[in-house]
Amino acid sequence: MTHVKSAGPCYTRLHNQIFIAMILGAILGSQFGEDAAFWLGWLGTLFVRLLKMVIVPLILTSIVTGVASIGSGRDLGRLGLKTLTYYIATSMLAIFVGLALVNTIRPGVGADLANAARENVPDLQPPSSLGDIFIRMVPTNPIEALASADMLAIIFFAIVLGVGITRLPEAPRRTLSDFFNAGFELMMVVTGGVIRLAPLGVLGLITSAVAAAGLDTFKPLAWYAVTIVSGLAIHMFVTLPLLLMLIGGIKPLTHYRNMRDALVMAFSTSSSSATLPVTMQCLEERVGVSNRVTSFVIPMGATINMDGTALYECAGVIFISQVLGIGLDFTGQVTVAITALLASIGAAGIPSAGLVMIFIVTDAVNLKGPEVALIIGAMLAVDRPLDMLRTMVNIFSDSCGAAIIAKSEGETAVNA
Ligand code: ASP
């Protein structure tokens, strides 16, 4: 894969088109509500289907290529260690910000959620336990994992294949490396084609999202939303840029600019997985991160590294405890912090995954029963806009990780 750092007129036009589509979608969705969603929503649905069509082959080929090209076990171990350290450290930083804010603003104290909760409870399905998620990372049938887009299992299987390839004798190693590499390049070309349709997809997605979010439901949850949004903003505009500058020596403004297509895509789709192809393209073609680092760090990051989700899980559960009038002591808050980290790792990169995983965290601190489900139901009423923002933060953190790790590996082209 070549790393062209061109910002040609076509690229700029696409970016502007996406921006115009967002504004148009917001206007149409708020003015014409369900009618607009009916006429335009299908564009968004089709666009997300196209993105999803790319994801499984892209993840498989890119991780296999990434792991196989890293070569020796020592290099793989070093890159793996850096990546995991970055994922855990940034998620913990986000969690601290969430903890600090929710304990200062105390949005749950006195919030009356009865109305907002009314219609949402039946939609929620509590997830399987953390232990289960861990065990199911190892697929008994890789083909089934691929067919059902089970991301953690696909990642595991792809790493195993990649490591296996490095152990083969020269001839089959080259054949298989070339095969997966060619598959990866093909998927990036297909992705490029799908991304050209982004303005239409974004128009459909934003129109439906705005039409669906009735403004009245927001009122009792306003402080809760303010807490989450402030936390996400601090992480995105203070913590991560500081890491970019201090550890990577990378200019944050340039990085925002380079990643803007991925950020818009994350915002419109609320899905890290659906955004994955765009994230990879921005990193390789705009930021100048090598394919070796991108294909290792990003597919895993899209599923495992979710700073925005971690912050949200933690602040959300403490919000629930405040609504119920149950004070969580220090041990309780530490338990929330740790389970929030694990829940964010286990959350799939799809819309509202974070909200569903919140049951794991509430369980860990013994917040159970119908009232809890009712409050989570109320939170669902405002989840879409919060999900759009936390997905953006999730993606941005992945991209900072790739850039910082690439710099630490001696890649001088990054943001040059
Ligand atoms: N939608 C988020 C993502 O894909 C996950 C979440 O719900 O927090 O990154």
Image: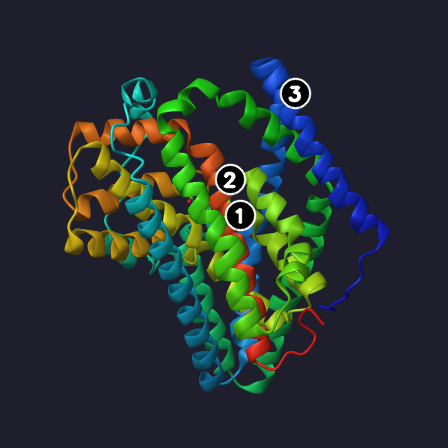
> Where's residue 145, x and y in %?
41, 52
Ligand 1 sits in quadrant = top left
Quadrant location, the C terminus: bottom right
Residue furthest to the front in view is 104
Residue of label 2: 388
Secondary structure of residue under mark 1: helix
Quadrant location, the N terminus: bottom right
Q: Is residue 119 left or right of residue 8?
A: left
Secondary structure of residue under mark 2: helix
Q: How many C-alpha atoms fall within 10 Å of the one at disc 2: few (<14), some, or many (≥20)?
A: many
Residue of label 3: 28
The residue under the point 80% across, 61% down is 6
> Where's residue 338, x and y in %?
26, 57
> Where's residue 345, x and y in %?
36, 56
Q: Which quadrant of the figure has residue 157?
A: bottom left
CB under 8 Å between discs 2 and 3: no
> Where's residue 198, x and y in %?
69, 40
Q: Earlier in the sequence, mark 2 or mark 3?
A: 3
CB under 8 Å between discs 2 and 1: yes
The residue under the point 25% across, 28% down is 110
Label annotation for residue 392 = 1
Kind of residue at badge 1: Met
Kind of residue at badge 2: Met
